[in-house]
Amino acid sequence: MSVSHAKDRVLVACGDFEGVGVDVEPVIEPAEAQALLPSIINDEELSAAGWAIPYWVRKEAVLKAIGKGLSVPMRNLTVSPPYEPPSLRHFEGHDCVVERVSMTQLQYDVDYYAVLAVIGTPLTQVIEQDISKAMC
């Protein structure tokens, strides 16, 4: 199971996977995102550097799925650019993990980015539920 929260949003991911990770972050202003870039973006990703939060969300979901959290520098991972479907392209020192990661962009909210990553089992079905509507 993996849990992520940002402001008033909470995501929970569970399933029969070797590892699962989810992250959600709010869309932020470009100037604020620029301050995050040095800790997130590596040299291969510089061409899409204005997209700090999608990179962050993709990388944190993978790090949660492998059980490392933020103990590994995000610059050690290379993910697909935000205008492509999410995928892990390189993971310094952990190349064997790359082929075993499946990722999907969640259709969560226009003001947030959210990604699900799993290890070992390709994603075939993702069910998204908004429990706030079920509770009314």
Image (spheres, helix red, strand yellow):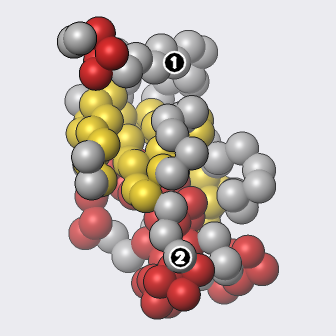
The quarter of the rendered structure image containing the C terminus is top left
Q: Is residue 36 above or below residue 17?
A: below
Left or right relative to 74: residue 133? left
**Front in this rendered view, residue 22 or 122:** 22
Q: Quadrant of residue 45?
A: bottom right
**Front in this rendered view, residue 47 or 122:** 47
The residue under the point 46% across, 90% down is 35
Q: Which mark is residue 126?
A: 1
Left or right relative to 44: residue 22? left
The residue under the point 28% across, 31% down is 12
Q: Is residue 76 something that shows in the picture?
A: no
Query: Foreground mark, 2 or 1?
Result: 2
Count neighbours of disc 2 (C-alpha within 10 A) and say few if under 14, some if 14 to 19, many if 20 or more: few
The residue under the point 57% across, 33% down is 107
Task: List x then y, in percent, for residue 31.
Answer: 54, 87
Left or right relative to 98: residue 120? left
Task: List x then y, in percent, for residue 15.
Answer: 34, 18
- Measured Cα–Cα span from mark 2 to mark 1: 30 Å
Counting the numbered discs, the total is 2
Q: Which mark is residue 29?
A: 2
Q: Is residue 14 above or below residue 59?
A: above
Q: Which mark is residue 98?
A: none
